[in-house]
Image: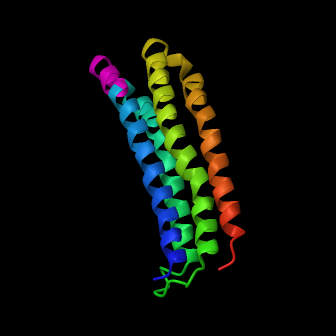
């Protein structure tokens, strides 16, 4: 196995692992707050579930980028390409935007979702505003996803 392919695998692993870890933390933060609300008012389960699920998208974005890398290097076709170190580094660097931004944005989105759950606890009629706040954090995860995809598309294998 070439050093280039090892670097590409590392990039895929970071994209999947960091973005997924951030999502797990963010979903956990929102879930803790949501569970507290539902002990008082179980009828708000649907609203809480939406707000808890939102920080999970970064994990999906990281998984998408990881799968794009594995597809690009031929893993799913059964024979991985022989990559140079330069190609491997380019793939690794292309994975970093979603790995890093996905990790941090998911955590902060979880915190924002927790705050939004507090809003619907006191003012259920403000659910639209409650969803907009964590969606603002999502913007940066989407930009990171787009950056990773565009950079990956620029690597010739």
List the single residue furthest toward the left.
39
Give residue 145's position: percent from left, percent from top.
62, 53
Up-down: is 76 above or below 19?
Answer: below
How many labels were placed on the picture?
0
Task: Locate the N terminus by quadrant.
Answer: bottom left
Q: Quadrant of residue 105?
A: top right
Give residue 36's position: percent from left, percent from top.
31, 21
Q: Main secondary structure of the magenta part?
A: helix
Give residue 10's position: percent from left, percent from top.
48, 64
Front residue of this view, candidates 51 and 60: 60
The residue drawn where x is 47% and y is 19% is 120
Q: Quadrant of residue 121?
A: top left
List the single residue furthest toward the top.
122
Task: Locate the C terminus by quadrant.
Answer: bottom right
In the image, residue 147 lies in the stretch drawn in magenta: no
Up-down: is 70 above or below 104?
Answer: below
Image color mode? rainbow
The residue drawn where x is 56% and y is 68% is 68
60 left or right of 140 in image:
left
Q: Which residues are magenta?
A: 33-43
The residue drawn where x is 64% and y is 72% is 86
Up-down: is 71 above or below 99?
Answer: below
Front residue of this view, candidates 26 and 134: 26
The residue drawn where x is 69% and y is 68% is 153
Give residue 30's position: percent from left, percent from top.
40, 30
Up-down: is 61 above or below 155?
Answer: above
Front residue of this view, candidates 81 and 52: 81
In the image, residue 36 lies in the stretch drawn in magenta: yes
17 left or right of 38 in image:
right
């Amino acid at each position: 196995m070439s050093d280039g392919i090892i670097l590409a695998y590392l990039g895929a692993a970071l994209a999947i692992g960091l973005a997924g870890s951030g999502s797990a933390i963010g979903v956990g933060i929102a879930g803790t707050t949501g569970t507290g609300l539902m002990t008082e008012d179980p009828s708000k389960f649907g609203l809480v579930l939406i707000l808890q699920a939102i920080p999970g998208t970064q994990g999906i974005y990281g998984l998408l980028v990881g799968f794009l890398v594995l597809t690009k290097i031929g893993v799913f076709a059964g024979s991985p390409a022989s990559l140079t170190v330069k190609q491997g580094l380019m793939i690794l660097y292309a994975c970093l935007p979603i790995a890093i931004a996905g990790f941090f944005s998911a955590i902060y989105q979880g915190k924002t979702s927790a705050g939004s759950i507090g809003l619907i606890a006191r003012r259920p009629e403000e659910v639209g505003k409650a969803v907009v706040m964590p969606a603002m954090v999502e913007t940066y995860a989407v930009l990171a996803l787009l950056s990773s995809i565009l950079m990956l598309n620029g690597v010739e294998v």
